[in-house]
Image: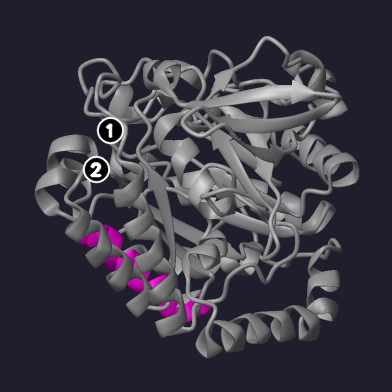
Amino acid sequence: MGRFNPCELEIELFCRGLRIDPSCTLEKDARGFHRIRAGLGSGLELVVPGDLKDVWCNVPVEEAFAAASPFLLRKEHESYAVVDGRDDTAYPVWLPGEPAWYGRQTSSGTPMSAIGVLQGTYLGVYISETCRFWDPGNDRHCQFCTSGLNVGKVEVARKKVEDVVEVARAARLESGATFVHFNAGYQREDQPEATRSHGLNLAAPYVKAIRERLGGFIGVQVAPVLAHDFWKYDWLVDLGTDHLSFCYEFHDPQYFAKYCPGKCGSLGQQTFFSALEYTAGNLGKGAVSGEIIAGIEPIEATLDAIDYITSVGAFPTICIFRPLVGSLMEGFPSPQAEDMKRVFGHLWEAILRHGIPSDVIPNIQVSLIVNPGDAAYLGRRDLRFRLYRAKMAALRTVARPYFARKLKPRPVAVSATDPPGPSSS
């Protein structure tokens, strides 16, 4: 393979980007560049094969820093390789093709790719209108984000439940997607208390519809609620949610305040921590994620975040900072690859130390991040490594009947539009 294992190459590509050789025929062979949601899916989807697992990554190709990358994607005899120009090492990769359903429309006439797209092997759907931190006069959006440039333009602003079900069914039947992830921007600002439409309320009808009509694994990521509304998380779980995630972005409070002014002013960092701890305590290890960005705040703060997230039994979802085109941080430098390898080596050690499951549920690989299971390539293959891997293999085997049941639709007695309230949860 050369000097980089699959995870190291993934990190190198996230940090340095990728140039495209004229020999490549991406229009025929690859998924298109889909700039939806926050914008992180704007790169090239590719897969690095490996002995432990195949590593999926969405590689920056359009950002300015990618033009100076030492890595070049080249095609020869119908096969692709990433070539490192510093030593001419060629790393074989393969490109997942564009799903046929991307080119179709839903029954209502909406392009399916404007409802949701695959990001790795899972279906991502942004369910709300533009995050209200992008509103004129209330523009306090996160400085690394481009959702306000995408939602309502290249993707539908508010998705019909029926359209989402149709797209999720196509993704399941034609692409094998077993996980649907719903997310939404902030929705509560400047609304009267009686008419507030929080992201959890927005997600509820979609969750119930997928659980009842398709089945599978369902994730939700929206702005956290305050403690008196924590019962809503239980309500979402009763409706069929399997995974909850909380994007607090930066562990250092000064960086959180600087780069996430809306989240800091309207929610506060502690709100994310409280919701993360509550849901992780109820759902168990690995069913909740704490999501942060690496490469902006000091590395020590990112390592502290990993230790905190795993200590409460949650799953660290660490995104390597990408200076997205159109974002307020477009001109920022991409992180150093060696720093990021240190971060993900630490992540792997934290996963082992706290026994957080990874790569247990079948066919869920997220291309926008370095998955914790990817970081196994950074660990020492000692006895502890082998015991953890054996435990994960055993969990996959024991849980097969459970996974099979989860993939089937089932009725849900709880209402998605009339929440039961705190006394009933």
Q: Residue at x 29, y 38 (%)?
A: 192
The stretch drawn in magenta includes residue 271: yes
Q: Is residue 89 left or right of residue 253?
A: right
Q: Secondary structure at mark 2?
A: helix
Q: Nearer the viewer, residue 281 or 345?
A: 345
Q: Is residue 321 above or below residue 101?
A: below
Circle 1 crowding by C-alpha within 10 Å: few under 14, some 14–19, many from 20: many
Disc ID at residue 142: 1
Pinpoint residue 297: horizontal percent, then vertical percent.
19, 47
What residue type is disc 1 on? Cys
Residue 116 appears in view: no
Q: Residue at x 74, y 57 (%)?
A: 363
Task: Provide the residue span drawn in magenta.
Answer: 270-284
**Residue at the disc numbered 2:** 263
Q: Main secondary structure of the magenta part?
A: helix
Residue 65 occupies quadrant: top left
Residue 220 appears in view: yes
Pinpoint residue 144: horizontal percent, then vertical percent.
31, 30
The stretch drawn in magenta includes residue 134: no
Q: Is residue 364 above or below residue 94?
A: below
